Image: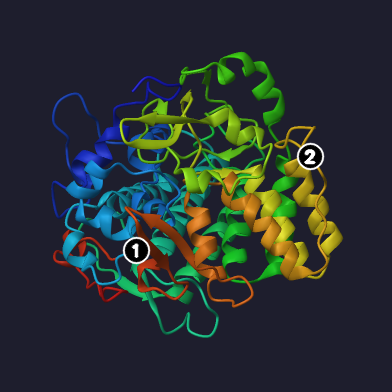
Amino acid sequence: MKNIFSNTIKLAALASVLSFSSCKKFIDILPVGNGQIPTTLSDYEALIRDEYGNHRADITQAVLLLNDKFETSSNLNYYPLYKANYNWNESADRIAFNNSDEGNYYNNYKGINTSNLIIEKAAGTTEGTEAQKAELIGQAKVLRAMDYDILVNYYADTYEEANAATKLSVPLILSADIGAAYTQVSIKELYDFMLKDINEAIPALGATSATVLHPNLGSANALKARILLQMGKYADALAAANEALKYNDKLFDWTTFYNTYKTQIEAVDIYNNAPSPMGFNYVENYYFRHGVSSNAGREQAIRVDRAARFEQGDARFASRWKLRTVGADTYYTSITTGFFNVGGLTTTEVYLIKAECQARLNDVPGAMSTLNAVRVKRIFAAKYVPLSAANTIEAVKLIQRTKGNELILGITPFADARRLNKDPNYAVTLSKTEAGQALTLAPNSHLWTMPFPQGASKNPGNGSIKQNVDK
């Protein structure tokens, strides 16, 4: 892996290697070879820089369920779980199929393990000031909350105030001890815990941080706004969104980007046109997290019917995907290469959180103004018309159209769809035609909650895991 964080101290790999090697705390194990036991603050800070281990969101099944990507027939035939989610098979036993789709589960718990280690040990390290130690612990708490937010929105039902205290979420692990006991807590308990982590972290964080992998005040408040929106706490989410925007309110101008690469983008049969602007230095970044892979490459391809849901004149879409036919398959292929912040936190998401909260709080003109601030940087001038809405319902639908397109391939569109499906004003039945067969996905389908992988449920360690879905 060759990118700006590739020269990480070897300790970054130590956590992943040793975390499976003993029932003791891996901090107490003398590693083999050139490794060393972490003792200094910089040793622990280096653990955060492990991109592949701590900053990757492999949410493949959520993206497949939404049909937000094009999947090949060979993959669908080879992976039964892919096919079940992609084609909305209500009768499929996804628990039985889920014997290899463990990436999201173990990636996030690996990150949680690293965060737990930092939280437990950083205060007692050598070197560094007390303020620096507190900041590193605060960064670890934000990352831990981020990992739990992805897990709970994947493996548990969406947050509903009426039943959040009685429905189970995911295992809450608070120790780096490999044999530590844990509890599969309620959805409410986990959401309260995530907010507690963030609120405890904020006083120790700075306005800027060492890298885009290290959370700061902008990223902490952005994540807080996301979680509060999921909980339906609109006034609090709006306050957090506004706080995040104090630290970064920049929006990338995709119309300018398109015009810069216009000749290449519009060239016939050319499908590799421009470097991704969505990498580590993307002006919209609060916090960067990879998707499935941490290597440089292309984005996932998009279905033709999914591409039709983008606005006419969307320069961001036109800059990233291009219609292509290969054999019997027609899809929109990725035409930029590099790194993509599909799993992290950006100003666009925060603007759209703010817009929805404004609409929910009956400031519809304000909501539309915030939405249009994003759209004007996306829609070609010849196609751009400021949007207006007559009421909250209309406003939220317009905001969600933009948000689903802007954050495509990340966890947020999936999380948003799940929470909006609980409200008849916004619930949507997805539909498509596949191989001549009409298929639908209802808002109340059990498919919206992913089953824990068999590796976790059959080998739960020092605790127990109960599936949150029957199949």
Q: Residue at x 73, y 40 (%)?
A: 249
Q: CA distance from mark 1 to mark 2?
A: 35 Å
Secondary structure beneath dot 1 equals: loop
Q: Secondary structure at mark 2?
A: loop
Quadrant of the image occupied by residue 127? top left
- Residue at 56% x, 15% y: name it: 264
- The residue where tag 1 is placed is 88
Task: Tell me where residue 234 appears, x and y as whole percent.
Answer: 69, 68
Q: Nearer the viewer, residue 87 or 147?
A: 87
Q: Nearer the viewer, residue 201 or 445?
A: 445
Label at residue 384: 2
Horizontal placement of 408 versus 471: left or right? right
Amino acid under disc 1: Trp
Q: Nearer the viewer, residue 449 or 271?
A: 271
Residue 78 numbered tag: none
Q: Is residue 298 above or below residue 405?
A: above
User: In this view of the protein, can residue 203 be seen by the observer?
Assistant: no
Residue at 54% from the left image edge and 68% from the top image edge? 428
Q: Quadrant of the N terminus?
A: top left
Circle 1 Cα neighbour tier, 10 Å, few/some/many (<14 / 14–19 / ≥20): many
